[in-house]
Amino acid sequence: MNDTTRELVAIAAAIAGKCQPCFAYHLKQARTLGVPDGDIRAAIQLARDIRASGDKHMDQFAERRLAGAEDSA
């Protein structure tokens, strides 16, 4: 994996993991490498989409379990 891809993955992971220091570090690294803002924004949006889907499914899972439904995940 090249350095640019590594930093974009790290940015997405920082967003998904809600780690502000990680995001700040990897954003700086990406900018040092000359990664375009468009690519950085795309990685951020991808992480947001994945996080939102996971949050939604976890909320639904919790509600099913509270209601006594079988785990169908």
Image (spheres, grey):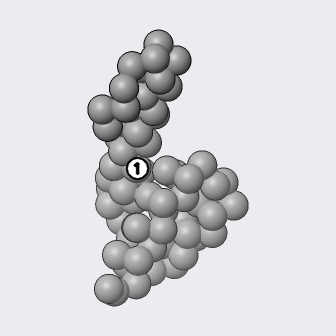
Q: Where is residue 21? Give x, y as percent.
A: 69, 61
Q: Quadrant of the N terminus?
A: bottom left
Q: Where is residue 51? Give x, y as percent.
A: 43, 42
Label 1 Cα neighbours within 10 Å, binned few <14 / some 14-19 / many ≥20:
many
Question: Outermost residue, right direction?
Answer: 21
Q: Quadrant of residue 43?
A: bottom left
Whether residue 29 is visible = yes
Badge 1 amino acid? Ala
Question: Outermost residue, top direction?
Answer: 67
What residue is pinned by disc 1?
47
Q: Residue at x 40, y 67 (%)?
A: 8
Q: Quadrant of residue 7?
A: bottom left
Q: Residue at x 56, y 53 (%)?
A: 17
**SS at mark 1?**
helix
Q: Where is residue 27? Give x, y as percent.
A: 54, 65
Of residues 52 and 45, the one drawn nearer to the viewer in this rendering? 52
Q: Quadrant of residue 40?
A: bottom left
Question: Outermost residue, bottom direction?
Answer: 2
Whether residue 31 is visible = no
Q: Residue at x 32, y 37 (%)?
A: 73
- Left or right: where does residue 47 sit relative to residue 23? left
Q: In the rendered image of this protein, does residue 40 appear above or below residue 62?
A: below
Of residues 7 and 63, the one drawn nearer to the viewer in this rendering? 63
Q: Residue at x 34, y 86 (%)?
A: 2
Q: Where is residue 62? Give x, y as percent.
A: 49, 25
Q: In the rendered image of this protein, does residue 39 appear above or below residue 41?
A: below
Q: How many marks?
A: 1
- Left or right: where does residue 5 sit relative to residue 31? left
Of residues 60 and 17, the one drawn nearer to the viewer in this rendering? 60
